[in-house]
Image: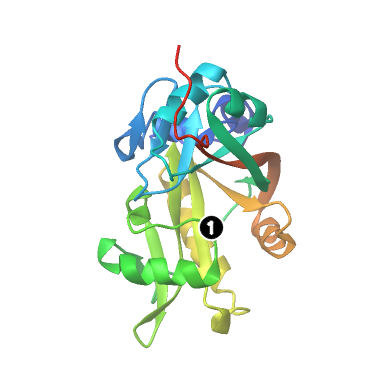
Amino acid sequence: MRSHKIEDMNRIDAYRLDNPAWEALTGKQAHLAEGDGLARRFFPSIAPFAAVGGITGQALERLAKLLPPGESVLLQALTDVTSTATAAGLRGEKLFDVLQMTDRSPIEPDRIGDVQRLTAADADEMVALAGSTKPGPFARRTVETGKYIGLRDKGRLIAMAGERMRLDGFVEISAVCVDDRYRGRGIAARLMNILRAEIRKRGDVPFLHVRADNATAIGLYRRLGFEDRRTFALYQLRPGRDGHTQSH
């Protein structure tokens, strides 16, 4: 497998990382999604994220048809989508900005030691840990998106991190969380370094998304060697009030 060199990344990421969910849902993670060539979404049991090939009325109308009444999805975008969503029969609300960061620095692999591989058998504990630490959306089948690792203390899962979106040349590190009682011990950095090294070994470039106002997490990621790339808006989209969408 060809390794993506840092000097190659500006050329590659211009069309992949600007719409990473779309690249993932139409590529390596298509089996975890539903939709077509205009709009796609992860199965709800996997993740709440959706994507469109472009912010157009036709694409958002198609996305609306994938949403039963009462369901919603999260859409990451570089431009405002609210007016186009409204015209397509969706209600759109901007939640907050997210910063996308890419890993460009050399990495010395951290020791695996007592870090464990997590599987579907650990799903209940993973959902509970994510629920208490709030790293972002995490469902019972999110573990199917990639490799996840964790750390236990006396048998109890106290920290984890893993891979969410996987697209050609890039892998997103996500669900980085540590139980409050174990913070300040370098656990998050250790888990991330293990993942970074493994992703690099496979020839891919690690990237991540973080809430743009989370200065503590951004500071950690910068110290590890991640660099700011660009800022997106995160929108929540749900069917219009009457549960129906427009059609041509």
Residue, x 49% and y 66% (percent of image)?
A: 191
Residue in front for this viewpoint, 87 or 232: 87
- Mark 1 burial class by Cα count in 10 Å: few <14, some 14-19, many 20+: some
Asked which secondary structure carries label 1, the reply is loop
Of 13 and 176, the residue lying toward us:
176
Residue 54, quarter of picture: top right
Q: Is residue 25 visible?
A: yes
Residue 213 image offset from top left, x and y in percent: 74, 56
Residue drawn 42% across the image and 75% down it: 151
Residue 109 seen anywhere in this rendered image of the structure: no
From the top left corner, tell me how far across and down residue 145 is, in percent.
Answer: 37, 48
Q: Is residue 116 left or right of residue 233?
A: left
| Rendered residue at 45%/35% (across/down) | 243
**Image location (x, y in percent) of residue 18:** 60, 31
Instruction: Look at label 1 and name its amino acid.
Output: Gly
Between 168 and 70, the one lying in front of the other is 70
Residue 72 vs residue 83: left or right? left
Q: Position of residue 229 (x, y in %)?
A: 69, 40
Q: Front-most of 33 and 193?
A: 33
Colouring: rainbow
Q: Quadrant of the C terminus?
A: top left
Residue at label 1?
136
Q: Is residue 10 left or right of residue 112?
A: right
Which quadrant of the figure has residue 127?
A: bottom left
Which residue ends up furthest to the top in the rendered image? 248
> Which quadrant is the N terminus positioned in?
top left
- Residue 121 vs 39, above or below: the answer is below
